[in-house]
Image (tube, rainbow, N blue to C red):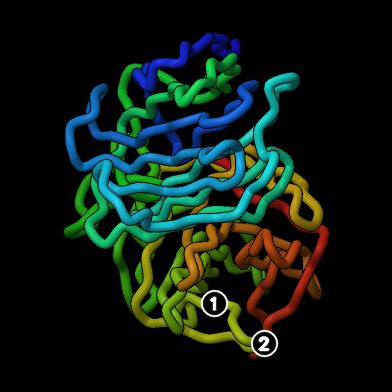
Amino acid sequence: MPIELNTPDSLQYQFYPFRNGIFQFRVRAPNDAHLILSGQANETHPVIEVFIGGWQNSKSVIRYNKSQPEVAEAHTPGILSGNELRGFWIRHNDGVVTVGKEGEAAAFLSWRDPMPFYVNYVGVCTGWGASGSWVIDDQGMGDQGYQAPGAFTESRGGFQGGYGGSPCWVPASNGQVPPDAVEGGTDGGEPIFVARARHEGDLIPAKLKPSHGVAYVAWGGGEHGKSDYEVLVGCRPQWIRAQGSSIPPQAVPAGETSGGEPLFVGRAHHEGTVTLGKVQPSHGTCYIPYGGQEIAYTDYEILCC
């Protein structure tokens, strides 16, 4: 059930668990809807604040550790309303904070934290002459908090043992497939697995084809093989049909561009295969690596865990 609450004109944060790398909410306020990302249910540093509709509802900013200057700023006149609820989302993925509007995949604010920290809670409040009414999506909320500064927990070390059922990325190389790896497609009767790898400053969802000894990423019109990569394990995958920039709210970011845009794991049917690739919301496209090329699909399936 959604959480409904009211916040007075006091700038006093009310805290809720932050899980799965995303916080979705609607707010009715004439100006100054404030949020804070924190490791604890308080304002102890480090913290990241997001001010939506500040400065008389004229701009929105991201502020680090309550200090100026702002680390990100956008001109957003009229973004809030005192008469109707308006929806937004905040993502935190591998230290990248992105803020966007409900129904829009592209962020209007983004910032990469040079010193990422564990985000367990998000606080909400209003102030500067405004009180607010909020509706918070509690999907995935619980008392355990968010697990890591990425889409899933990071796992380091060897492949011995299991991973406790918690989704995580495991480093691997040269075609290695760790236990409990997530199978996402087929190519010539061979299973291919969900992976990711770095290329040209991006962290890109990839397809791991073990017999080739590499994970392939789609980038710049081509298919690029990577002998070092990370493999997703411990996820019970759900593949949801999607189109264009319509990203389901339960989809979890698996990478990001060098500019901070989140990337998701997608797949498409191509020439008798089911091939994994990257979904880039601002392009409205799932790009798959195949046959040396980067191939675009606007109808695809997207991974949810």
Which one is closest to the eye, mark 1 or mark 2? 2
Residue that appears at 31% across and 68% down: 172
C-alpha gap between disc 1 and disc 2: 10 Å
- Residue that appears at 28% across and 34% down: 38
Residue 219 placement (x, y as % from top left)? 59, 81
- Residue 177 versus residue 13: which sits nearer the camera? 13
Amino acid at circle 1: Val
Quadrant of the image containing the N terminus? top right
Residue 269: name its quadrant.
bottom right
The front one of 268 and 92 is 92
Determine which of the numbered discs, if any, sits on residue 217 in the image: 1
Tell whether label 2 touches label 1 (CB within 8 Å): no
Residue beneath the point at 67% across and 81% down: 290
Q: Is residue 212 above or below residue 261?
A: below
Q: Is residue 72 left or right of residue 27?
A: left
Structural crowding at the residue carrying mark 2, measured as other residues with C-alpha within 10 Å and reported as few (<14), some (14–19) or many (≥20) = some
Q: Which residue position holds label 2?
A: 221
**Residue 260 higher or lower than 200, as above or below:** above
Residue 3: percent from left, percent from top: 54, 12
Decide if residue 110 is in sight here: yes
Instruction: Count up the numbered dots.
Output: 2
- Secondary structure under tag 1 reads strand
Determine the residue positioned at 31% across, 31% down.
Answer: 120
Q: Nearer the viewer, residue 169 or 219?
A: 219
